[in-house]
Image (tube, coloured by chain):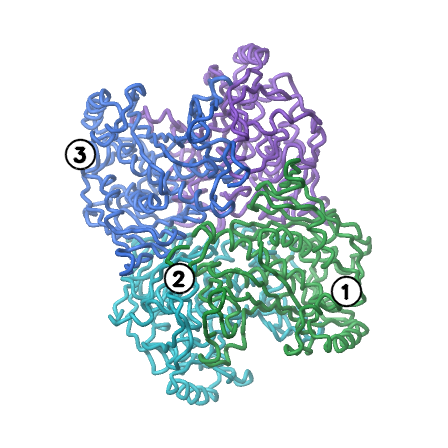
Chain colours: A purple, B blue, C green, D cyan
Amino acid sequence: MSHNTFGHLFRVTTWGESHGPALGCVIDGCPAGLSLTAEDVQVWLDQRRPGQGKFVTQRQEPDAVRILSGVFEDERTGGPVTTGTPISLMIENTDQRSKDYSEIARAFRPGHADWPYFAKYGVRDYRGGGRSSARETAARVAAGAVARKVLDGVTVRGALVQIGPHAVDRDRWDWDQTRENGFWCPDTAMVPVWEEHLETIRKAGSSTGAVVEVEAVGVPAGWGAPLYGKLDAELAAAMMSINAAKGVEIGAGFASAALTGEENADQMRMGNDGIAFQSNKAGGVLGGISSGQPVVVRVAFKPTSSILTPRQTVNEAGEEIELRTKGRHDPCVGIRAVPVVEAMLACVLADAFLRHRGQTGGGAFAPGGDGRR
Amino acid sequence: MSHNTFGHLFRVTTWGESHGPALGCVIDGCPAGLSLTAEDVQVWLDQRRPGQGKFVTQRQEPDAVRILSGVFEDERTGGPVTTGTPISLMIENTDQRSKDYSEIARAFRPGHADWPYFAKYGVRDYRGGGRSSARETAARVAAGAVARKVLDGVTVRGALVQIGPHAVDRDRWDWDQTRENGFWCPDTAMVPVWEEHLETIRKAGSSTGAVVEVEAVGVPAGWGAPLYGKLDAELAAAMMSINAAKGVEIGAGFASAALTGEENADQMRMGNDGIAFQSNKAGGVLGGISSGQPVVVRVAFKPTSSILTPRQTVNEAGEEIELRTKGRHDPCVGIRAVPVVEAMLACVLADAFLRHRGQTGGGAFAPGGDGRR
Amino acid sequence: MSHNTFGHLFRVTTWGESHGPALGCVIDGCPAGLSLTAEDVQVWLDQRRPGQGKFVTQRQEPDAVRILSGVFEDERTGGPVTTGTPISLMIENTDQRSKDYSEIARAFRPGHADWPYFAKYGVRDYRGGGRSSARETAARVAAGAVARKVLDGVTVRGALVQIGPHAVDRDRWDWDQTRENGFWCPDTAMVPVWEEHLETIRKAGSSTGAVVEVEAVGVPAGWGAPLYGKLDAELAAAMMSINAAKGVEIGAGFASAALTGEENADQMRMGNDGIAFQSNKAGGVLGGISSGQPVVVRVAFKPTSSILTPRQTVNEAGEEIELRTKGRHDPCVGIRAVPVVEAMLACVLADAFLRHRGQTGGGAFAPGGDGRR
Amino acid sequence: MSHNTFGHLFRVTTWGESHGPALGCVIDGCPAGLSLTAEDVQVWLDQRRPGQGKFVTQRQEPDAVRILSGVFEDERTGGPVTTGTPISLMIENTDQRSKDYSEIARAFRPGHADWPYFAKYGVRDYRGGGRSSARETAARVAAGAVARKVLDGVTVRGALVQIGPHAVDRDRWDWDQTRENGFWCPDTAMVPVWEEHLETIRKAGSSTGAVVEVEAVGVPAGWGAPLYGKLDAELAAAMMSINAAKGVEIGAGFASAALTGEENADQMRMGNDGIAFQSNKAGGVLGGISSGQPVVVRVAFKPTSSILTPRQTVNEAGEEIELRTKGRHDPCVGIRAVPVVEAMLACVLADAFLRHRGQTGGGAFAPGGDGRR
């Protein structure tokens, strides 16, 4: 994690501003020989793409990705494969609507990055939020598409579990439903509640926060490492690096503070495929290392600060002003965050896999085994 | 963050196991010329030291720190100062009580790192938890003491805000009280409630989780950087790297999911010292960069899994067994975590300060200024 | 230095293959507020551009650079400036001549990266050398152009000092001449010797090695750091990362092995601007830290292995074959390496400057000073 | 490479000053399950140990190493093995002779790090060179001993090939001789020449430079990676980070500048064990990746600047003075550098091996194979 790069062996560097000519990422350290086409990436970008409903920004971007390097179509392989060299992905911006930014060019929108960017750099690309725009997350999703290729046998999937005060009922959880509604909602009974809530929010020109939950199924025991490279520490950084994220928790998370040791410690029995845990309060990570259970992460997103209600603020000249944010914005950025959180989980796991393989050779010791991998 | 090192310019590497001869850390990149004695470090270690009450482990360790390098007593400076070279700090273990570990040597304690360490490495130092022991946090506190020297003008302080289901009343918050009771509790009315709760827990041989809150006052606007080096991303990783941490949030954190944009966006007025925010839902970080407000972080700790109740588990031979954890343990590891969380906040901020100074020269632009730092 | 990224605070990531659609770099951590246009970068790229003489490859590439991010044209600044966010630079490949690669697609050219790329990755982009092509150095030169902006007051310049067995006479050294001949040669008397040598080499379908020397004038004392981040260690890695580089030396370099301590240790007197060294055997670096003298580095380049003489080799099928390399190639890659070596020196120094400023605030203590910066 | 740490997966952090209480290193990322005792490290430290002849410093240090963490003696394994956690090694300084440093405390010795350390930090531990002392190399050798454990099947060995103007005759090269004389000299006929040369140097209170050559035999094809993580770039940085190193070359190195393409490109035939190269001008590295040939590196060391001849210099007060260096010093630091250069080669290769295994799984494709590893 250093400014605009994350990962150690599977490394992702992103670049681009909301209203610049393009944005993209460079993925370094990817294993060679993985089949990879632009379509493989596009399918995930299409899931994140805005402009697909009245509860997300109306900006229309095709988000068409180009692969500029790192892939080679060898006639013997029957299709393009990764070569082990940097994979450069680029998405051109096409709908940077020309508009008058004079009102916000020198004002600091409350709850936005305007003020700290100015304080730090003295200059900022105020068009559409510049580098702090949610458009940057397209690059994350593109990188995540490549990470999924690395994670053979691992399923990464996400859901929206709370919008405003309305949380899903976990007893009604159905993963199959998450792709069926526009909200990644696993609880069909909650969908009309969210629709009504968002309609109220949208009409009021307001916005609302949300909570995303992702899990990775099929992660073997052994990924991650003590102590500052703990798998959960890497996940926390990756998730908190997403725009508008304000909290991250693993497994039982903050709820574990109210548990007793008896409730919290997941008991173990032997199953057909090795250890069978009786519960997953740990969220698949113990001591910073994956346990073989599903890795479960939740991320809280604040409501976007781009609202129609006039708010008190100041400008670069040090004058107190009132400001309301016009333009195309999401009433709930959390909805579009689901594919982004999935992508970050995939990237962190791909990196953890390669690092684990580097230090240990890649296998895991098993209970009842012969002491060999 | 790479295995046992964190930080970029102010870098901390820790080493040591619970029952090895010693533990310690190497701090690299510290500015030169800072006054630093072993006593400067010891005062913070003494705050973390176990064996100071019936609700913490009874292991008695003096935790006496030695400075092995990086400090030079120049007669002209009138005392030892940092030289800019690596500062090596060592704490000898003295109370590694010799005991019979045969019961747990080959068993995986539920909720512990035993199993994933074995799965990854095939060997583990099972004595007292080895590397995953909370003793490692002494090295963090030592590093934090040096980080505080770097953070001239910044106050870092922490409190315990929840034990089990009992959270403090924020209306009764009094920072002065946190050092007055054994719980770092800012709400004196809560102290007897916690005492009773912990006594029940302790007698039952059980344990309980907790939530720690820390803040840094005096951090100027401009520290941190988009996007994967966001200050909050670095904080999230640092906090989640602490033993038993399961959740991290900044400012309003998970509660922000239930807020509207109007409630969440902190409005700004001009004060005597620049921008005066009307609230701090952001927790002092916007767009990954400090805003000038106090940086506020909360960390959830799970209950320790070392409990007296027999639990179902398995061993290295793949046999299903029952196990109860004997030995000296904390009913609530969250209590001793307060100085640790403070230390991690200090280390991350020291690093952010140096990186900010590197890229920008260190100053900040001000509203109403002349466009110069 | 990790695969395709180098630098710590001023970080450069490059991507692209010889015959892919484009190549480029992402520069992260650049200070904000620096004036930067595509023309500022183009002027340096034009110096490296091939196709400008009979002794360099005949591939015709305009090497037109585009700035895709990290720069913003603020009306108040009167022109585009860096914003502190990642600067993405892209150069499209336009002259990837379509040709028949069947002869080398499965053969390992002697002295080329063909074999180890295959051994490592199992697949390689054999068109024009793929990632190992000298075309990648365009991205380095582009990054160097930005680094020069950071290095206010520092002059970086290079010369070719040896081609084949013919070294320049240092007594005839004239920096003004280096831009006057096509060889970056500081010794005009050597130019006809090199011309004749290269003509012979070219007609024979052979190639020759060379040595480049660069210096940076105006580097203040204090940049760099012990011990693994020594300025000379960073320079050595940066230079050796260039295609075809086989040796790096600082100051007297290998010649210092034959010196006595008396000859080698540069004596010091007080000059008008601080310390005046009587010689510069150290090449401007002592103990890994700049001394205030010019930083002097020499890099040896091997002859390109793309020659017309048939050579013994093997192919992927494990068959022994003979191969001669056709195509457009440089008889002396060292000539075009001069702007590349300059660029790498600039990038390493920019990074060293920012890191120095991070740890120390940026100033230097002076002899005779008051003990303050 | 960041200040006092090097490596990516196999990471070494060193600390300590010449006259502090101790020095040491922390090795992070080492694979688990490797047999490791203090004796395994001591045997290599003893080779570096000064005080073993009249041509090396007379400081008498036992250099007894202690393993403080990262190793666990499991009764089942029959001896201590690495656990995958940080290995902390410490060597106490015992012969820091108390002396009067007043003469050099404020003077800058020519050719020493005194001046740039002062310029950068404003304070320096002048006792025995502080952090810039050759004593730090003991920590490198200790780390190298662990790296050798990782490099199963790889032989790392070094020789001194030049002292002052006297280079060995490569036709008389005999590896068995290097351990037989006190000079690591592979050419017995050269030993008396060096002895006479050094005796002259020693009597004159002077010093001389030297060149060390190391090779690693048994490195498979595939280690390293384009482009900034090239194996030779990592080696260059590692070698140049050693005290007094001024030049690094791989294979033919600087001599390759005078070669033709025909002479330089190592031809290939098929041998019993895969590719058989007809020469090794490349020094075992092509395109930044190992070729399967021996990796060959040469490092030039300058003469130590600690000489008895009075030299012109200045002091902190800005006064011009004359200074001659008293104390225990090496007439030729290059002699003791052989085990250090070996250790750095071992550390870089261990890291390259783990990174290669991380990205690729560890195997290599072979000519004539079935396209699988």
Q: Circle 2 is placed at which residue position?
A: D143
Element type where label 1 sits in the image: loop
Viewer-side residue, B297 vs A252 = B297
- In the visual, does D79 lie left or right of B231? left
C355 relative to D104, above or below: above
The quadrant in which the N terminus of chain C is found is: bottom right
Q: CA distance from mark 3 to mark 1?
A: 78 Å
Q: Circle 1 is placed at which residue position?
A: C56
C239 relative to B5, above or below: below
The part of the image, by quadrant, that contains residue C217 is bottom right
Q: Position of residue D251 (x, y in %)?
A: 58, 71
Mark 2 or 3: in front is 3
- What chain is tagged by disc 1? C
Q: Circle 3 is placed at which residue position?
A: B53
Q: Amino acid at mark 3?
A: Gly
Element type where label 2 sits in the image: helix
| Residue positioned 48% across, 22% down in the render | B267
How dense is the environment of label 3, judged by Cα within 10 Å: few (below 14), some, or many (20 and up)?
Answer: few
C34 relative to B245, above or below: below
- In the visual, does C163 lie left or right of D294? right
Q: Position of residue B303 (x, y in %)?
A: 30, 30
- For the image, the number of numbered tags is 3
Element type where label 3 sits in the image: loop
Answer yes or no: is residue B314 visible.
Answer: no
Q: Amino acid at mark 1?
A: Val
Badge 2 and badge 3 both on one subunit: no
Mark 3 or 1: in front is 1
- What chain is tagged by disc 3? B
